[in-house]
């Protein structure tokens, strides 16, 4: 009898638990907050799935504000995943949903502008960033206006329209309400004047940044400022200062990487870069000492030896410039990777970057350190495309072979261009890796569209991904 009562009691408890769990329905706001948390933790698939649930819940609740916000966040997440057409479509839906909310429209149009910029549609990108500015001004919210001005200023800086960039960056600074963000504006202005080769203004902001450096708490900003100071010193051929700022930049950047990733390929490569720069610096000091000794000796010799010295210094100068170019190529790629979320994506992007860097260095393959670096990145017998294919197979197992089998009409060049379209490389980078002209790459893309019946509004990437 007691056993039977216990069983009945247990069944009642389980029934109640099942009832409450089945009737616990999350609201749209709860689902949205949960999706944001997933995205923050770099769990992209879970975030996207939960955003879709929040979307349905917001529709059923009739909450248009949350619906538009969810569409906006989904669009930005799709943008991070390189699904540009889907991102633009979702962001346009957000704009239609929140057409009477200028603040939302400003952020949404900025997202669309960013998507068009990434796919090299500059005119459309400018148009949407201008729309973002217009809606920000309609909102009369100084924070929104500051962000909109900063976005379009950064765009104009990227495309080399420095005067427009200066105008909008200064407007953004005018409406900025956070004092801690001021050094970031000074850094942007310093870079613009450096690119414009306006040395007085660039040096003015350089001095301000040096004064602000010790009072800044943001480690990422401090890293960026030290990298600018390194660039500035290199333009002035101040090797000692350049090494000092590069060492500070590398040490701080290594510290940030350790906090984020602990141990991965990027950290190892960064350490290698630092040691290489340090070794090159020591070699440079030895060269200077040797040059001084030679100069003292040459003071006692004939003018013919002075001519030899001039030729020697010219070769040394060429080597310094070559070293500077290689350092900048690697470090610019490293800074670009900081925007990518998730260890797996970061590793893949890093591997792609290394292959492309080797492609750019290929013209200097006779130099002593080239083969050592190439051997560590991929076998010396491989082409750059072979190395890309290895990484591509790691990211998309079996997809390359499936494309080759399904589309035998594609020529070898068209097949390779199609594969490269599914990687993060631009058309120019694809041309570099395949050893073709940019005109050849564009013709191949046009031919792919014709052979596979891909309409202009559709992307080659989506065709190759979704049908295989």
Image (cartoon, rainbow, N blue to C red):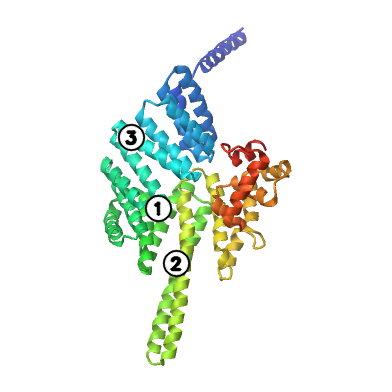
**At x 44% / y 72%, what residue is drawn?**
282
Q: Position of residue 35 (x, y in %)?
A: 48, 30
Q: Which mark is residue 160?
A: 1
- Mark 2 or 1: the one toward you: 1
- Within 10 Å of the Cα at label 2, are there few (<14), some (14-19), or many (20+) other Cα atoms? some
Q: How many marks?
A: 3
- Work out which residue is located at the far top of the displayed protein and give it: 1
Q: CA distance from mark 1 to mark 3?
A: 24 Å
Residue 424 drawn at (x, y percent): 55, 47
- Of residue 118 and residue 330, the one placed in the foreground of this image is 118
* Closer to viewer: mark 2 or mark 3: 3
Query: Of the numbered discs in the image, which one, if any, rests on residue 200?
Result: none
Q: Check disc 1: other Cα within 10 Å, few if <14, some if 14-19, many if 20+.
A: some
Which residue is at a point 40% across and 52% down the rendered structure image? 160
The part of the image, by quadrant, that contains residue 235 is: bottom left
Q: Secondary structure at mark 3?
A: helix
Lower position in the chain sequence, tag 2 or tag 3: 3
Picture disc at residue 136: 3
Mark 2 and mark 1 lie on one chain; the one further toward the N terminus is 1
Residue 323 in view (yes/no): yes
* Depicted 232 relative to depicted 305: above or below: above
Q: Quadrant of the N terminus?
A: top right
Q: Disc 2 designates what residue? A: 278
Screen quadrant of the C terminus: top right
* 3D distance between C-alphas at marks 2 and 1: 33 Å
Q: Please, is residue 257 above or below residue 109 in the view?
A: below
In the visual, does 203 lie left or right of 456? left
Secondary structure of residue under mark 2: helix
């Amino acid at each position: 009898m007691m056993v039977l009562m216990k069983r009945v009691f247990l069944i009642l408890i389980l029934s109640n638990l099942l009832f409450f769990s089945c009737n616990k329905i999350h609201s749209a706001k709860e689902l949205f907050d949960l999706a944001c948390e997933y995205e923050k933790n770099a769990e992209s698939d879970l975030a996207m799935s939960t955003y879709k649930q929040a979307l349905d819940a917001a529709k059923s609740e009739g909450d248009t504000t949350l619906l538009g916000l969810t569409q906006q966040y989904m669009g930005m997440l799709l943008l991070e995943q390189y699904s540009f057409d889907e991102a633009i479509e979702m962001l346009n839906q957000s704009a239609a949903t929140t057409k009477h909310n200028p603040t939302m429209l400003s952020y949404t149009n900025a997202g669309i502008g960013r998507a068009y910029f990434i796919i090299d549609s500059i005119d459309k990108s400018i148009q949407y960033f201008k729309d973002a500015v217009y809606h920000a001004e309609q909102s009369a919210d100084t924070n929104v206006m500051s962000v909109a001005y900063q976005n379009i200023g950064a765009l104009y800086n990227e495309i080399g329209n420095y005067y427009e960039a200066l105008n909008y960056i200064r407007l953004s600074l005018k409406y900025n309400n956070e004092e801690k963000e001021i050094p970031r504006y000074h850094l942007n202005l310093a870079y613009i004047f450096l690119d414009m080769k306006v040395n007085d203004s660039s040096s003015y902001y350089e001095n301000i940044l040096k004064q602000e450096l010790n009072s800044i708490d943001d480690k990422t900003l401090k890293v960026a400022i030290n990298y600018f100071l390194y660039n500035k010193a290199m333009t002035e051929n101040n090797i000692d200062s350049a090494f000092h700022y590069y060492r500070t930049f590398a040490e701080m950047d290594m510290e940030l990487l350790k906090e984020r990733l602990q141990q991965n390929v990027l950290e190892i490569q960064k350490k290698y870069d630092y040691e290489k720069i340090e070794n090159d610096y020591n070699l440079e000091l030895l060269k200077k000492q040797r040059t001084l000794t030679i100069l003292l000796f040459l003071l006692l010799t004939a003018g013919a030896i002075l001519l030899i010295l001039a030729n020697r210094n010219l070769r040394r100068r060429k080597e310094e410039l070559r070293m500077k170019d290689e350092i900048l190529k690697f470090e610019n790629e490293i800074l670009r990777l900081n925007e990518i979320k998730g260890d797996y994506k970061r590793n893949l992007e890093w591997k792609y970057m290394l292959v492309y860097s080797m492609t750019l260095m290929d013209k200097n393959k006779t130099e002593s350190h080239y083969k050592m670096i190439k051997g560590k990145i991929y076998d010396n017998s491989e082409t750059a495309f072979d190395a890309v294919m290895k990484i591509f197979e790691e990211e998309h197992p079996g997809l390359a072979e499936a494309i080759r089998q399904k589309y035998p009409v594609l020529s070898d060049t068209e097949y390779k261009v199609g594969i490269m379209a599914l990687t993060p490389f631009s058309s120019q980078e694809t041309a570099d890796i395949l050893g073709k002209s940019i005109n050849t790459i564009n013709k191949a893309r046009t031919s792919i569209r014709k052979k596979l019946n891909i309409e202009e509004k559709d992307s080659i990437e989506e065709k190759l991904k979704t049908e295989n």
